[in-house]
Amino acid sequence: MKYPDVLDPLKVGEYPASAKSGGGYVWDAVLEYRVWCHPVRGAPDEDDGSDYYYAFETFEEAKEFADQNPGTEAPLALVLQREYIDEPEPGEYVHCREERVTEWPVTFLTRPARDEFTIPDFLAPDAPSNRLEILRGHAPRARKC
């Protein structure tokens, strides 16, 4: 699978290390691909024993680095969510209209990027019982572009 290009290659490596972790259900853009390195698992100690990461423009570069270096995790995607879906309680969904940045497993990027109807369709009273089918692009659209 070919994963999405980053939004701005010139900004790769410039984003703060701290980010939300997962969640939000939808994505708007990939900012960078990250490979976290852990000295306690065999990565070189480059930050006084602390974990650190390398940022990449493509998933393929990140994967190659992770495969060739000990003490690394599988690549993650740093994604921009211009809007997202919060789930404060199981099955309770809230449309959040604010930007945030979060790290995601790259497999989540197999879902289509959010469009103007994704969240309204997900929250609609007549949404399918498995609302994730909307996010995966497998459910009929309630609204037309």
Image (cartoon, rainbow, N blue to C red):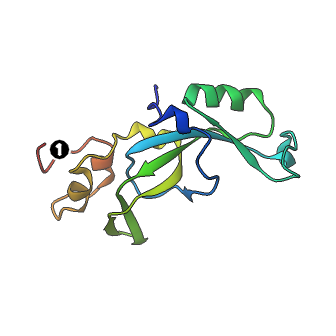
- Residue 27 in the image: state x and y as whole percent: 39, 48
Asked whether 102 or 71 is in front, the reply is 102
Crowding around mark 1 (Cα neighbors within 10 Å: few <14, some 14 to 19, many 20+) is few
Secondary element at image label 1? loop
Q: Residue furthest bottom?
A: 89
Residue 25 in sight here: yes
User: Which percent across, then down, holds residue 129?
Assistant: 25, 58
The answer to whether 52 appears left or right of 8 in the picture is: right
For residue 14, above or below residue 2: below
Percent across and percent down for residue 134 are 27, 48
Q: Is residue 99 above or below residue 35?
A: below
Which of the 4 image quadrants contains residue 94? bottom left
Asked whether, in this view, residue 27 is left or right of residue 16, the answer is left
Amino acid marked by disc 1: Pro
Q: Nearer the viewer, residue 90 or 81?
A: 81
Outermost residue to the left: 144
Residue shown at the point (46%, 43%) measured from the top left: 108
Q: Residue at x 80, y 40 (%)?
A: 71
Residue 128 visible in this rendered orientation of the protein: no
* Quadrant assignment for the C terminus: top left
Tell me the residue at 37%/63% (across/down).
98
Total marks placed: 1
Residue designated by label 1: 140
Horizontal and vertical percent position of residue 57: 56, 31
Image position of 112 (left or right of 37): left
| Residue positioned 28% across, 41% down in the render | 137
> Residue 58's quadrant in the figure?
top right
